[in-house]
Amino acid sequence: MSASLALTHLVPLAKEVDENKVTPGVLGFIVFAVMALAVWGLMKSMNRHMGKVTFEQDPEDRTAASGGAERTGSGSGGKAAPAKG
């Protein structure tokens, strides 16, 4: 009895809904859920890959940088750039 009473109260609410209004519905929810799962999977994969990264410099770069004048120029094979003046 209470189910039919509740149904009669919901029918006027359903008539108040604008029939020209577009709602996402079930398809919108499914698309959103798939996108959320894809983002979650990508974040998990990124976290796993970032865990493998070492943030230490190579020993060669560290010794060359501490030597000072050993390394001048930018990527010229170790040769010093000519002085302008």
Image (spheres, rainbow, N blue to C red):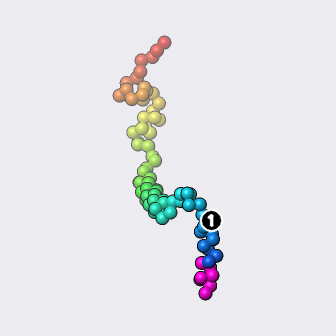
Q: Residue at x 43, y 56 (%)?
A: 42
Q: Nearer the viewer, residue 6 or 70?
A: 6
Q: Residue 41 at what x, y percent from top left?
A: 43, 59
Predominant secondary structure, magenta span: helix
Residue 65 visible here: yes
Q: Which residue sits furthest bottom?
A: 1
- In this rendering, the answer to whether 35 lies above or below 80 is below
Q: Residue at x 48, y 12 (%)?
A: 85
Splitting the image into 4 quarters, where does residue 59 fall?
top left
Q: Which residues are magenta?
A: 1-7
Splitting the image into 4 quarters, where does residue 76 fall?
top left
- In this rendering, the answer to whether 53 lies above or below 37 is above
Q: Residue 39 at what x, y percent from top left?
A: 46, 56
Q: Which residue sits furthest left?
A: 77
Quadrant housing the N terminus: bottom right
Residue 52 covered by magenta stretch: no
Residue 51 visible here: no
Q: Residue at x 63, y 71 (%)?
A: 12
Q: Secondary structure at mark 1?
A: loop
Q: Nearer the viewer, residue 70 or 52?
A: 52
Q: Residue at x 59, y 68 (%)?
A: 14
Residue highlighted by disc 1: 16
Q: Nearer the viewer, residue 16 or 73?
A: 16
Q: Residue 65 at what x, y percent from top left?
A: 46, 35
Amino acid of disc 1: Glu
Q: Residue 49 at what x, y percent from top left?
A: 41, 54
How packed is label 1: few (under 14 Cα within 10 Å), some, or many (20 or more)?
few
